[in-house]
Amino acid sequence: MRAVPNWQLIARVILVIAFVLLAVWMLERFLPALAWAAVLAIATWPMRERLARSGAEPWLVATVLTLLLTLALIVPLIVLGIQISREAVVIAQWVRSLRDAGLPTPEWVPQLPWVGAYAATWWQIHLADPEGAKELLGRAESVGVVHWTRLGSQLAGRLAIFVFTLLSLFFLYRDGPLLVEQSRTVADRLFGPAAKHIGRDAVATVRATVNGLVLVGLAEGVVLGVAYVAAGLNKAVLLGFVTGVLATVPFGAPLVFTIAALMLVAQSEVTAGILIFAFGWVVVFVADHFVRPGLIGSSTRLPFLWVLLGIFGGLVSFGLVGLFLGPAIMSVVLAIWRDVVTMNAAGYEISE
């Protein structure tokens, strides 16, 4: 077999790197969709294996799983959309009454410590007086038009990513085993035997992160839902459901229990509102800093600090998909570190 000259080998490497970078640049807008598809495929791969063992065709397995996952993602959004549209009617009626008659200052506002007098004066000028209320609402509406215009364009972009995610997910389900086998072959040729367990650790970390975020988020919804019921909130079950759905993303649960606390304060239940707000932050703090890192770390042998850094660092660097990519990256780095330590302990010498 004729040996390849060094200059040809270097040229091939440069050509491969150039085309890989060109492909990444060309697919930059679709990389989030591909990343989400990979995360969802890894998280649900055991279901794919069980269906494949039943004898179903790969295309049928891919179709069924893609449809099920689509329903699991869309149904909560539809429920929330219907409820929001119903509440929007009530809010519109409240805004009209506020324009016509203003909103009287509640008795508890002047009693607030330190800021009671200032808050009561502001309320009297901007909300209790119909003219002040009209001016305030006019400013809010002018800002709202710009906000909703931007939101519409962002939703269109998110919808496109969602569609490409589902399309990519279908092909991952259908051709996944072949892709996994080819990836193992390429990784083994490029990086040697160590690539196998590094990839296995990364996959286990992604799966554990998905399970940790979803299961812990649902648990937060149940715990805070019980608190909503105890506080006597209207539609406490719905608020608990919304909390559980949004708790899977950072700062989602605080948004809901803050709204719940404000609803209680508006009903003159100031103590209950403060308790809900404080209890909500306690639940979120424990879940985000102890339960989730512990659940993910126990499944992936990642230390607590590495899990925490991976979750929040990935979120800052890559957005929501970074919640899953961050811990996976940290697991790869830790696996490489362990390999180097093992090689050194086995008597390998690193040339200087």
Image: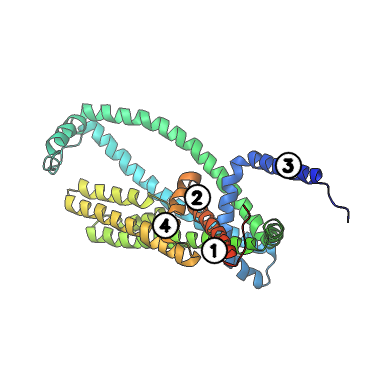
Residue at figure coordinates x 29%, y 31% from the top left: 137
Q: CA distance from mark 1 to mark 3?
A: 33 Å
User: What residue would you read off at disc 1?
Assistant: 204
Mark 3: amino acid:
Ile
Q: Residues within 10 Å of mark 3 (few under 14, many from 20)?
A: few
Which labelled disc corresponds to residue 322? 2
Mark 4: amino acid:
Leu
Which labelled disc corresponds to residue 14? 3
Q: Secondary structure at mark 1?
A: helix
Q: CA distance from mark 1 to mark 4?
A: 18 Å
Q: Residues within 10 Å of mark 4 (few under 14, many from 20)?
A: few
Mark 1: amino acid:
Ala
Q: Earlier in the sequence, mark 3 or mark 2?
A: 3
Residue at figure coordinates x 13%, y 44% from the top left: 108
Q: Earlier in the sequence, mark 1 or mark 2?
A: 1
Q: Nearer the viewer, mark 4 or mark 2?
A: 4
Asked if residue 311 lies left or right of residue 99, the reply is right
Asked if residue 17 lies left or right of residue 111, the reply is right
Q: Earlier in the sequence, mark 4 or mark 3?
A: 3
Mark 2: amino acid:
Gly
Which labelled disc corresponds to residue 305? 4
Quarter of the picture holding the N terminus? bottom right
